[in-house]
Amino acid sequence: MKRVIVGVTGATGTIYGVRLMELMRTDPDIEIHLVMSRSAKLTLKMEHDLELDYINDLAHEVHEPGNIGASISSGSFHSEGMIVAPCSIKTMSNIAMGNTGDLISRAADVILKEQRKLVVAIRETPLHIGHLENLTKLARIGAVIFPPVPAFYNRPSSLQDIVDQSCMRMLDQLHIHIESAPRWGEEGGVPAVGQTIKGDKT
Ligand SMILES: Cc1cc2nc3c(=O)[nH]c(=O)nc-3n(C[C@H](O)[C@H](O)[C@H](O)COP(=O)(O)O)c2cc1C
């Protein structure tokens, strides 16, 4: 069983976190641990008609962002790594500076200290030099800085195509290969957003 931690923050693009989980649910050997910040829940309401219950059901375990005693806050909790998507400037800066006052930044800090894979889908533009300095710091301490920048060589025809391509590449970073978008010279396909069939979560 591969365990993956998904952190969703209040940057625009909640769909990236949702879609990552939908894609991972196509692999029964993956156990998903979700933490959504308070701001992420607000942003979700502004951006989508998806219900919070649907999103929570995609995870095998949902952790409250204030619960710094959760399993994922300890290095003894083994996982393949963590993806923060979308990642706000606030949370990115907290992780870069080692400010671990909430569960997302604490779990991310633990991933880094244990030398596991942390993928940070930073979502802001334009970036000032303070952002860039913090991102540089974060890259130096081992995180993969992964702004979800669309590719066009695969000829996306919908928002889902664009989101799926970025999500596939984020999962590749954790050595989880789900063919949600055509790779160069290949084809792939998975159920659309909001249509993942819920299975037994055990
Ligand atoms: C609709 C909406 C979109 C936002 N988009 C971004 C964004 O793209 N990037 C960002 O850094 N913050 C964005 N914010 C601001 C964050 O939500 C805010 O900084 C929040 O404190 C982040 O907290 P968190 O990292 O704990 O989720 C947005 C806020 C709202 C309401």
Image: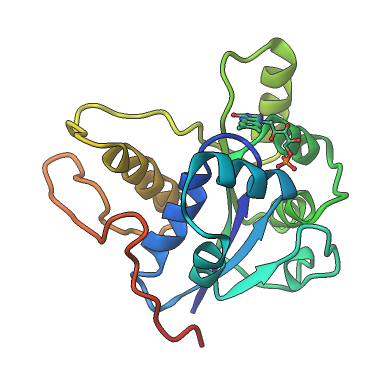
Q: Is residue 159 above or below residue 201?
A: above
Rendered image quadrant of residue 81:
bottom right
Q: Is residue 27 above or below residue 161?
A: below
Q: Position of residue 36 (x, y in %)?
A: 66, 55
Q: Is residue 169 above or below residue 58?
A: above
Quadrant containing ligand 1 reads: top right
What residue is drawn where x is 75% and y is 53%?
113
Q: Position of residue 62 (x, y in %)?
A: 65, 69
Nearest to the observer: residue 165 or residue 145: 165
Q: Is residue 159 above or below residue 186?
A: above
Judge left or right: residue 141 versus residue 27.
Answer: right
What residue is drawn where x is 85% and y is 62%?
68
Q: Is residue 8 visible?
A: yes
Nearest to the observer: residue 62 or residue 80: 62
What residue is drawn where x is 17% and y is 31%?
155
Judge left or right: residue 50 versus residue 86.
Answer: left
Colour mode of the rendering? rainbow
Q: Is residue 120 visible?
A: no
What residue is drawn where x is 24% and y is 47%?
181
Q: Position of residue 30 (x, y in %)?
A: 46, 73
Judge left or right: residue 104 versus residue 80.
Answer: right
Q: Position of residue 173 (x, y in %)?
A: 45, 49
Q: How many marks?
A: 0
